[in-house]
Amino acid sequence: KNYHTVLTENKKLYNEVQELKGNIRVYCRIRPFLPGENRKSSTIDYIGEDGELVLVNPSKQGKDGQKMFKFNKVYGPAASQEEVFLDTQPLIRSVLDGYNVCIFAYGQTGSGKTYTMTGPHSPTEEERGVNYRILNDLFHISRTRRDTFMYEVVVQMIEIYNEQVRDLLSNVGIANTSQPNGLAVPDASMHLVQSTSDVMDLMQTGLKNRAMSATALNERSSRSHSIVTVHVRGVDLKTGATLRGSLHLVDLAGSERVDRSEVTGDRLKEAQHINKSLSALGDVIFALSQKSPHVPYRNSKLTQVLQSSLGGHAKTLMFVQINPDAGSYSETLSTLKFAERVSGVELGAARSQK
Ligand code: ADP
């Protein structure tokens, strides 16, 4: 059996399972090769239109080296920022309709998490990431509704490093707002904004504050999680009814495994904290996808902070980022396994039930 046959056999089952999990979406994005990388060494052999992907182990020949995955979407290396953004649009409307939405970027360092979320350094219009596009759209839609709704938008930005939470905007003047703090971080400051550029300015400041604490030895940005939260309060001008929605844009710490025999001290502590929080996040999303009565939010700061925005009527989107280089094969395999688990659908398991 080749993977096309396996896929056809599994598609019906997959679609049935997926229907049940409408609030959790997993989109996989494969970044292009960068200058200097060997283009002939890709571990990705096949990308299907319905979110299929075949990963090839560079050291195994034939079928034994192939493993198939399926997600809600898979973007190949040629996918544009615009294309990726368009698939997030239904979620933006949800925020303005009063839902909580979380968008995560997961993957090893260098796999394109920041590129997808923010874009490269000094991006052209085309290279702008989903953050900017989503905010633009959010403000645009809120303006088109201005005859019926009055919206107030408030922003927070925090970092989680070694299970400690830090407000990245504490040095920015705090605006008055009647909105309740939406994060489970009592002292995280809240900033009233009117436009996309207000938010981008705050994010710029937050990124500077984040970089200032980088140690000389390692780039802190890849060792910590950053969360930008946008709270929206809408007042229905006719009835006076209020609705509240929120959007969390989360750039996660790099998921790469650190060889425990080679690191000690601070580096080991960081690695343990990152491991713990990423697996706690995986466990929470998995429990939600299974509609499990017990969701283990308490196991990490990350899941505690986001508790009220994960689960219930909340909607979750995870961008799973892939570096296609053969040298990253084992990291890519563990990234895809993580993604497969959070999506709640494992093709291997589905197959053996037949
Ligand atoms: P991460 O945040 O996961 O560490 P980055 O977003 O910094 O990774 O991406 C690593 C490098 O790859 C950067 O130079 C980035 O500009 C580039 N890159 C990532 N994704 C893409 C893409 N889709 N198109 C072009 N370049 C990309």
Image (cartoon, rainbow, N blue to C red):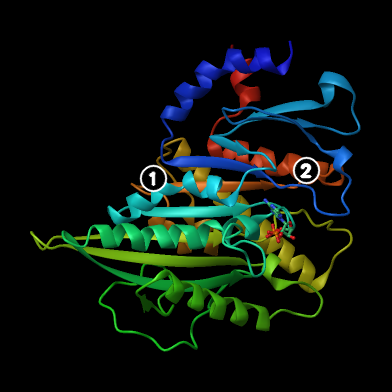
Instruction: Identify the residue at image location x=64%, y=44%.
Output: 29
Per the rendering, the mark at residue 90 is 1
**Where is residue 69 shown, x and y percent of the image?**
65, 30
Quadrant for the C terminus, please. Answer: top right
Q: Above or below — where is 201 with respect to 9?
A: below
**Regarding mark 1 in the picture, which secondary structure is present there?**
helix
- Look at label 2 and name its amino acid: Pro
Q: In what quadrant does ligand 1 lie?
A: bottom right
Per the rendering, the mark at residue 324 is 2
Q: Above or below — where is 49 with respect to 9?
A: below
User: Label 2 near label 1: C-beta < 8 Å?
Assistant: no
- Give the mark, 1 or 2, whose residue is nearer the N terminus: 1
**Regarding mark 2 in the picture, which secondary structure is present there?**
loop
Mark 1 vs mark 2, CA separation in Å: 29 Å
* Residue 166 appearing in the image: yes
Quadrant for the N terminus, please. Answer: top right
